[in-house]
Image: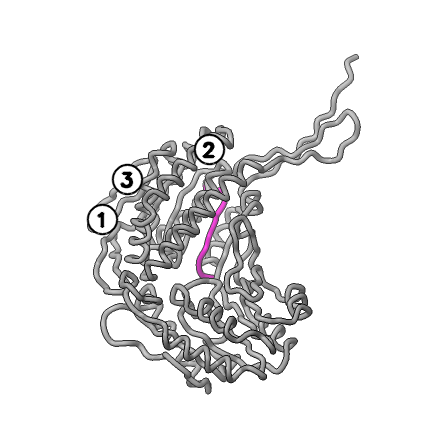
Amino acid sequence: MTGHLPHLIGGQPVFPSGLASRRITNPATEAPLGSFYIATPAVVDAAVSAARMALPCWMALSPGDRAGMLRACAESLAANAEDHAHRITQENGKPLTEARGEVQGALEEIHGLIGLSLHLRSGKQMSRAGDLSFQQVSPRGVVACITPWNYPFLTPLVSVFAALVTGNTVVLKPSEKSPNSVLAPILSVAGHLPAGVLNVVLGDGGMTGAALVEDARVDFVLFVGSTRAGAQIALANARNLRPAAMELGGKDCFIVDAGADLDQAVAAACHSAFYNAGQICTSAERFLVHSDIHAEFSRRLAVAAAQIALGDGMALGTRMGPLIDRGQRDLVAAHVEDALQSGARLLTGGQIPDGPGFFYPPTVLTDVSATSRLWREETFGPVAPILEVPDFETALRVADDSDYGLGAVLFTQNAAHALRAIEVLDVGILKINTPIGVGSGTTWEPRRKSGFGPGNGQELLQALLRQKSVTWRALNDH
């Protein structure tokens, strides 16, 4: 990738000139990858206008006709999966194996959404004899999809396809830190869709994102990103009295119960804390370990973390890539330093390596203060802070003592404890004895400052539709 990236408006690449530009760099090498002109309010206005113009024809299509076009898009994306994976690694830094997994996961979700869309039904209601009462559904209209950089292919495309399969048109603003991971794939499939159905504007949140959510012609916002940005978008939605679904920050706990299988728990902990360099909203960022096994679990996790090969995601053998940029690395380092100043004990990692790239090693700390920034604030990096707990009920109480409520992991061989966690943990995603807990078609709803609204599946598709209740009474002929 070289030169300026275009916006996609009304089915055509658009290169507005003379505006502020932003450079894109490879986080592993700091080499430039390209640049783009930041979309101004005028560019955003053109994109929303194109989406509104395309809406009547797109929503008038049958679900089967829309599904056919979107399947063609998905097949085209699958045909170039390796190119997409390479682009993700170059822009995001994650190992190529993880990038391939992201592409495959996105394609599975897309096909799942297309299938679900064909089975959405309006429901007949209870009504008296001679009356007909039913629900009629219709698309929301223009959907703004604003998405992050940590899964720069999967998250945008799942949001976009969810909106499109339900008959909405879309203006997508991907993250300015990894825009071409989704822009290039969309440009390659745009010919399968009517002009204006899917539009892409590139830019930051301050100008481009703000202009998009302030536009009163936008009918729904799908946002995945930080809690801070989500709060700003929520204010704009309130001013426009507009619905939204938001998945925001997380500070997931990982509970290791007494008697847990430590081999399996440590392997899962490594995945939960260090996959994608810990840059996942459902990464485990607080480890609560029973006092009976705290010392041994901490030792084993530190040994396993120290063996993770850090490097360029394109290099064979790399198991963890860099953080997305210098600012994110500085934040992670500041959280670790604050924890150490508060009395935490460093078991491994914690030092920025020499050389280019925004690398930070897998880091494990124990005796972490529950009042430190590392324990309270979202870190979004490869750090596993451990706190010893005396019993299971304490673990549950500490787990819910958080501003966030996105997900949690529990490792236990006690069925009663598992059932208790299902009942009381106030999170949207609970994974028991596994670090992975979201399959195609499943849904969840975040709690507290982690957001609101359905995260996926049929419930998300229903949220993207308006419901109209119709009661029709036959009149007697006199």
Distance CA(mark 3)–CA(mark 1)? 11 Å
Segment tinted magenta in the rendering = 218-227
Residue 464 in the image: x percent, y percent?
A: 53, 43
Image height of 27 relative to 334, above or below: above
Q: Earlier in the sequence, mark 3 or mark 2?
A: 3
- Answer with left or right where residue 15 lies relative to residue 380: left
In the rendered structure, which amino acid carries the disc numbered 2? Arg
Residue 86 in the image: x percent, y percent?
A: 29, 54
| 3 and 1 marks in contact (CB < 8 Å) | no
Q: SS of the residue at dot 3?
A: strand
| 1 and 2 marks in contact (CB < 8 Å) | no
Residue corresponding to mark 2: 66
Q: Residue at x 30, y 62 (%)?
A: 313
Image height of 153 relative to 268, above or below: above
In the rendered structure, which amino acid carries the disc numbered 1? His
Q: Earlier in the sequence, mark 3 or mark 1?
A: 1
Q: SS of the residue at dot 1?
A: strand
Distance CA(mark 1)–CA(mark 2)? 32 Å
Image height of 360 relative to 443, above or below: below
The crowd level at tag 3 (other Cα within 10 Å; few <14, some 14-19, many 20+) is some
Image height of 367 relative to 333, above or below: below
Q: Earlier in the sequence, mark 1 or mark 2?
A: 1
Residue 241 in the image: x percent, y percent?
A: 54, 47
Q: Residue at x 49, y 68 (%)?
A: 268
Quadrant assignment for the C terminus: top right
In terms of depth relative to the viewer, which is nearer, 293 or 7? 293
In the rendered structure, which amino acid carries the disc numbered 3? Pro
Q: Select label 3 or label 2 by which is in front.
A: 2
Disc sitting over residue 13 in the figure: 3
Residue corresponding to mark 1: 4
Q: Residue at x 63, y 35 (%)?
A: 122
